[in-house]
Image: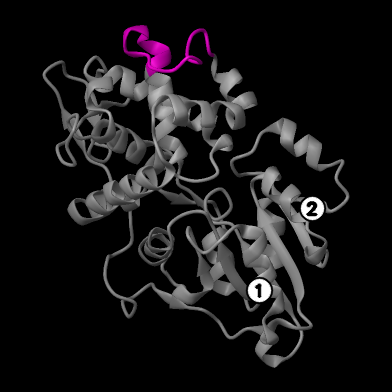
Amino acid sequence: MVAARFLGTASGHLERVVGALPAAGSLSGRSILPIGRFRPNFILSTPPLGGAGRRGVRAARPTRAAMGGGDLFALDFDGVLCDSCGESSLSAVKAAKVRWPWVFEQVDSAMEEWIVEQMYTLRPVVETGYENLLLVRLLVEIQIPSIRKSSVADELSIQDILENWLKLKPTLMDEWQEDRESLVDLFGRVRDDWIENDLSGWIGANRFYPGTADALKLSSSETYIVTTKQSRFAEALLKELAGIDFPSERIYGLGTGPKVKVLQQLQQMPQHQGLTLHFIEDRLATLKNVIKEPALDKWNLYLVTWGYNTQKEREEAQDISRVQLVDLPDFSKKLK
């Protein structure tokens, strides 16, 4: 089973069906994006779908902690284990069409392709998935002045967004009269709808970074996932794409509290006493929040070199004594 298929068109060129971009105001329908400059690297074949007992799905190995001593790893999901930028961008376009159908009346497939391309560049500013919807609408307003409802879109560049997102986000929420919970709920419902109607397409719009799935499968350390992604989506990708039957109680997703609070909970658990603590992230801002908490001084902190961060952030991290840069080969070695 593959996650994408190719169709011949009247003009003779090939087009790839990537997910299902609905008509404005709906949760269904299909859209065909031309290959063009669209990044194909997240379109993968998926393993056979099915339950936890199917071939290829592995349960976690016994941990070293069970034998005394050892390590505890708290891993971010998006940007550390999984490259979900393709799926989250497409889901955001779907959701934005539902939320603001009038905004997309002048948006054609070429502009949709441009939007998804820009989302790769902008992904480092996203902390929680619903922010993708705001970015999608902002990109449309940048391109189409006649539909602007925000005061910030005029002459705004992609670099401006990267450098000022924390200031732009509350302005957009206020001027568009949006609330966080409604956007979070919509983003989740759109993903659920995509999964229900096209599971292989949704799975195939994600990919695990090279070696990360194997490292997680083979790890004998105490391992948890601490993410701002809704837990059910992380669990589905681990099972269906990576072939890992990861315990749901070890996934701390959206709604379980800030990551600093989750780390405090993990280190206070009786079964974790005496373990060496490691937190691996792709967002430098999150690691800085951990550093601000004296109660978390025992955590070894790592910024990955392959996730959703910028060269500038990686250079900054090199000057922070608590933060270590880690590349993919070292990541796999650490989890053993």
The question of residue 266 being in magenta is answered with: no
Q: Is residue 4 visible?
A: yes
Residue at the spot x=60%, y=44% of the render? 307
| Amino acid marked by disc 1 | Leu
Mark 1 Cα shell of 10 Å, populated few (<14), some (14-19), many (≥20): some
Q: Quadrant of residue 43?
A: top left
Q: In this rendering, does residue 1 appear at all?
A: no
Mark 2 lies on residue: 292
Q: Main secondary structure of the magenta part?
A: loop
Q: Residue at x 53, y 35 (%)?
A: 123
Task: Tell me if residue 294 comes above or below residue 155 in the rendering.
Answer: below
Q: What residue sits 58% from the left and 86% below the top? A: 62
Report the side of 45 relative to 167 (left or right): left
State the extent of the magenta-drawn residues as a range: 141-156
The percent position of residue 57, horizontal first and vertical second, equals 39, 73
Label annotation for residue 266: 1
What is the x, y in percent for residue 179?
41, 40
Q: CA distance from mark 1 to mark 2?
A: 18 Å
Under tag 1, what secondary structure?
A: helix
Q: Is residue 242 left or right of residue 195?
A: right
